[in-house]
Image (cartoon, grey):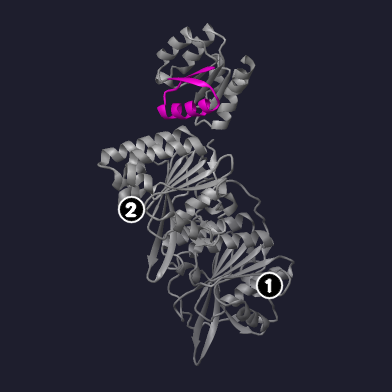
Amino acid sequence: MSVLLAERDPYAAEFVDYFLRTEGYAVRIVLHAAEARQIIENEPLTLVVVDLMISGGDGLALCRATRERASIPILAVSAVDSRDEALECGADAFLQKPLDPLQFVSTARDLIGTSAYLRRGEQS
Amino acid sequence: MIDRLASGSDGLDTALCGGLPLNSITLVVGSPGTGKTILAQQYLFHNASVDRPALYLSTVSEPLEKILRYGQSLDYFDSSALGSAVFYEDIGQTLNNSGLPGVLEHITELIKQRRPGLMVIDSFRALQVYASDTGAFRRFLHGLAGRLSAMPINSFWVGEYESAEVSDAPEFAVADAIVALSTDRTAERELRVLQVVKLRGSGFQPGKHTYRLSQRGITVFPRLADSSDASSYGQMSERVSSGVAPLDTMLSDGLWRGSSTMIAGPSGVGKTLLALHFAFAGVQRGEVSLIATLQENPIQLERILRSFSWSLQDAGIELMYRSPVDLYLDEWVYDLLDRLKQTGATRLVIDSLGELRSACTDELRFREFIYSLLQRCTRENISVTMTQEVPDLFGIGRLSEIGTSHLSDNVIVLQFLHDESKVKRAITVLKTRGSDHDQHVRQFDITSEGVVFGGQFASSQDLR
């Protein structure tokens, strides 16, 4: 259950990482869009969280590239209300920063389809 | 559209044009005893919930025990919220043991564990001395602001800063909002004043707003200073009686409804009585008249009224008595506006402008205040009569010094005149806006019937 967190702000990344881990998700944090692209191409992921302002505003392009390659759920986040643009570029959902922990975790869980704990239960 | 955080004080939210921007960093600054901690705690208890709890972090300025002991005596303090919606933590120990890096780590953990919607750091000023140099403190500020901005947290940094520090201390640049609390002193009189120094992304009401600290916490009275309002309103083209028929004749059939009238004259000449005629004339027509007095208390006023066959008990008469001692101008005016609204009064007597002026340290501010009040009344079609004492007992040399005379639509002057061994009273309509008036000086007396007009003065009468 791996979540890729492509986030430019290390403080926001630290908190989101913590909230996802407490829910049972494994998280990989990247602070640059190029690094995110490599991981998306090469590794299995259950969710990609994209800060639209990553790498100077490369987030929309990253959403588009992710959508073209795979059907992984994409959660776009930004301090600026860019919901329409994000959805147009392939994101499945958009949340405006600062992120409310409950709302964020709930949205992530909805996008993945079920909680990591439940899925683990199904596998066993 | 910026989402706002309410304070629990309507007046403060008005001064902030709706409240603090949501998820902002607010610096609350002021000298000891100005109510900084009360203001911060009021925000906390007003907004905290189990889902979005509040964290109060004390540093090394005041022991947490003491903050709690005094805090619990105030109305907003809800002890049932402690431990569920409001958490108090002492980070002084961390600060002493691990310095600012330790504080950052401690706060980060608290954010993760508690997921707070609000956070107070009190005293923030005390943190500075733990930095080895300015660079270290700036790094700490950057790290703290970064963490707080990453989460939906409204934070309050409370500190005893001097006014000179506003331009130098780096936290003033980092803060989204700055609220300064202070005390203005004039002779033996003290006035608590709040100023919004900075509010990122939003307008605010500039200038000094008075406030009081009480059991209820902090109550702010935003400075009444309305800018001009060009929007139209239902102005009534109706004349209303002054309550004295010959004066109505001098005024060309009374006064415009919604107009303001100043009655100026020396002490004892009959200003209050003439204003009371105006109030009771309204009552006779079925209107409600509000008498806002800063002079006679209700018992004294009732005794005066009885001698003219009037009473405060008469249907339609409303009284708002306030002592001129320790008067806060804006507190008074919001009480007045509330009473006008509650009672539906269409006539207002203010007795007197002199007492109100004494409560204001600044002439220009007083003119703004009167202008705003009269504009609000005229837009509601409330007719206002104000009394103004002048220092000259005989012959009034100047009215221009009474800075508000030009703001009144109508000015009526009452005078004492010498007449051999007697003193006579004289009335003159000096100014009427939007109507004609009789320019003669008329004699009047005060009898049990109230103001009773006599004839015109003989040409030999010295009118100075």
Q: Return the residue nearer the eye: B254 or A28.
A: A28
Q: Which mark is residue B6?
A: none
Report the residue that reaches farthest toward the bottom: B421
Residue B90 is at least partly visible in this image: yes
Is A3 contained in the magenta span?
yes
Is B6 contained in the magenta span?
no
Report the residue that reaches farthest toward the front: A124
Q: Residues within 10 Å of mark 1 (few under 14, many from 20)?
A: many
Residue B280's quadrant in the figure? bottom right
Q: Return the residue nearer the eye: A113 or B305.
A: A113
Residue B13 is at least partly visible in this image: no
- The answer for how far apart the CA atoms under marks 2 and 1 are is 51 Å
From this view, report whether residue B90 is shown above or below residue B215.
above
Magenta part of the chain: A1-29
Element class at badge 1: helix
Q: What chain does badge 2 belong to?
A: B
For residue B337, side relative to residue A44 (left or right): right
| Residue visible at 49% across and 78% down in the picture | B266
- Residue B182 spot, x, y in % from top left: 40, 58
Label 1 is placed on what type of residue? Phe
| Residue visible at 48% across and 80% down in the picture | B463
Q: Which mark is residue B280?
A: 1
From this view, report whether residue B460 is shown above or below residue B230.
below
The tag earlier along the polypeptide, 2 or 1, is: 2
Element class at badge 2: helix
For residue B88, side relative to residue B60 (left or right): right
- Residue A4 spot, x, y in % from top left: 48, 18
Q: Return the residue nearer the eye: B228 or A2.
A: A2
* Front: mark 2 or 1: 2
Q: Which mark is residue B163?
A: 2
